[in-house]
Every structure is written in C-alpha cells, then in structure tokens.
Image (cartoon, rainbow, N blue to C red):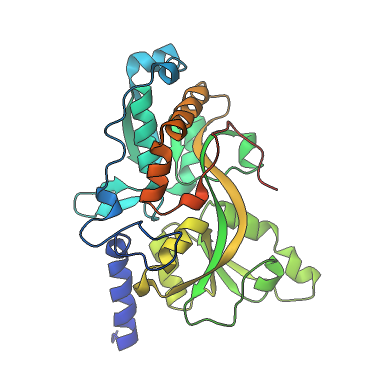
Amino acid sequence: MRTTTASRRLLAAAALLPVLALAACGSDPKIAGAAGAGGSAAAEDVVSGLARSETAAALLPEKVRAAGVLTFGSSFGTPPSAFYADQAGRKPVGVDVDFTDAVAKLLGLTVRREEAAFETILPALDSGKFDVGTGNFGVTTARLKTIDFVTYVDDGQGFAVKKDNTAVQPITDLAQLCGLTVGTGAGTTFETTLNSKKGVCTDAGKKPYEVKAFSESGALLTALQQGRVDVEMSTINGLRHQAAQDAAGVRFLNEFHRLDVGFAFKKGSELTPAFQAAVNQLIKDGTYQRILRKWGITDSAIPQSQISPPEHP
C-alpha cells in the first residue's frame, strides 16, 4: 500500500516517542525537569545511596527476610510511571521503578522484576505468581475488595485530544463524550469508569460514546493521532508528560478524578506494614521529594503512606 506523507509523519512521530520520553519536557511546570538533553531524568540516581532500615525491615514476615527476594509483576511502556530508557538494553526507569528500588533498599530486599501486561497483574497477585504489583495502580472501591494497597503518590484520571482538536473542551461530565470514540488502556480504572457510565448518554437521549481499549499505550497514542479515537483517557501524569512531547501532537484537557496510587498486594498480605513504613521513611528523609522532582510530578505528593485507604470521592 502506498505510504502518504501524512502517514510517514505519523510513523516517524510514533517511532520517536520512546526517545522523546527522555527529551526536554517543555514549559509545563508539572513536567519541567523530568528530562533534559544530555542529562535525562533516567540517568539521575536517587536510590543507590539508601541503607537498610532495621525498623522497617523488622516488619517483614520472617520467611521474607530470610529469602531476601520479592517478585514484582510490573507493567512498562507509560512514561513517567515505568518505561524503557534504552530499548536495546531494556533498562526500566520511571516513578514506579524508583519507588520499588528505594523501598527494596530500605527493606534489605532484592527485586525480582517480571514484566507483565497491565490487566494481568492484579489477578496474578491472588494466584501467588507475584508478591507485589506495580503499574500506577489506582486505589478504587472495586479493587479494594480483592487487593490491598500501600500508597506512594496521588495521580488519577484525565483526558487529552489531538493538539489541533479545539472542538472538545475539558471533560467535567462524561455526557460531554456522547457520540465520540474514547480510547483508553485495557483493564484500567478508565475503562471501568467509561463502561459503567455509558448510560449517561442514552438517559439524555444522545448517541452513546464508544470505548476502545488498548493493551499498549503506543497503540492508543497512534489511534488518537490517526483519528481512530477522538479522546484519550489515561493517567494525569502520563497525559501531561505525553502532551509535553511536541511530536506526540497531544493537548492535555483536564484532570477528571484523582486517585491514590500504590503498590498492590493480595488481600490480607503480611507485606503491607513493612512497605508502608518504608515509604514513610522515604518521605521523612527527603528521598521521596527527590524522586518526585526527578520525574516532574511534585503535584502528586502525599503527606504519608496509607494501607488501603478508601477511594477519593
């Protein structure tokens, strides 16, 4: 099939996105400093100097202290949460990665990190495949039925459109999406929210919006660029980061619903007190703020870590 000039531009932009995740992040103060030419955020080490905290480590189950290893099921591909800075070397970086490594340092544990599709991680915790899950998992009422969380940042749900789309304005009510096609991540709180609220359109006598779920963030972005979806619903920090990359051609619309984000565990896990203590130690010693500044998400700071708090209203 013949490749048009427009198609070539879209393909080039999509190919550049992994690199652009480490490029200059523009003027948005919430993103500024998350990367820089010749000295990307990915290269800044804010973790290796941490020492074991005997107080936090003492809260671990004895068998875990003896083994010294935990298996993390982790989702990658969405800056600044977790992605690969070096596609060739497959070095994982991001907010989730730094907090995982920092907590492991304080607890005296080795991280056995296994990449998994976002939508498979929480079910795998219940089966025992993973001890801990990371993937910018938001704390929701539905998830709290089967999952325990130890919170470390506050992120949530937001919307974005193509930069040249001026027809869609900030979304404060899902009824504004009626008649549009909304793209989002498979197995996410965004997909759940959208599917559970479809009735707002039919109740108003309007055409329902269509939801398209994607397992990869790159595929979702390409669909937005090519006009196969009108609106993207994803994480606030992820969309702001994405919008700061010129080649992405994305305009951040607005925050929709804030959510606590945390390490995920099987319900009733004995690991949560130690993880909470470790995150609170990071907050106390200043490492926490250094991680947030590194990735340009200081607006996502929390005053203290909590175990399975209720979903934000």
The residue at the point 33 percent across, 20 percent down is: 68
181 is higher (above) or lower (below) than 42: below
Q: How far from the left and from the top, in percent, is residue 203?
A: 80, 68
**Which quarter of the rendering shows the N terminus?**
bottom left
281 is higher (above) or lower (below) than 171: above
158 is higher (above) or lower (below) than 96: below
278 is higher (above) or lower (below) than 243: above
The residue at the point 42 percent across, 39 percent down is: 288
Viewed as shown, does residue 66 lie left or right of 139?
left
- Residue 174 visible to the viewer: yes
Q: How far from the left and from the top, in percent, is residue 171?
A: 64, 68
Q: Considering depth in this image, is 113 or 306 the residue closer to the camera?
A: 306
Viewed as shown, does residue 147 lie left or right of 124?
right
- The image quarter in which residue 281 lies: top left
Q: How far from the left and from the top, in percent, is residue 222?
A: 40, 71
The residue at the point 63 percent across, 55 percent down is: 257
Q: How far from the left and from the top, in percent, is residue 268?
A: 57, 24
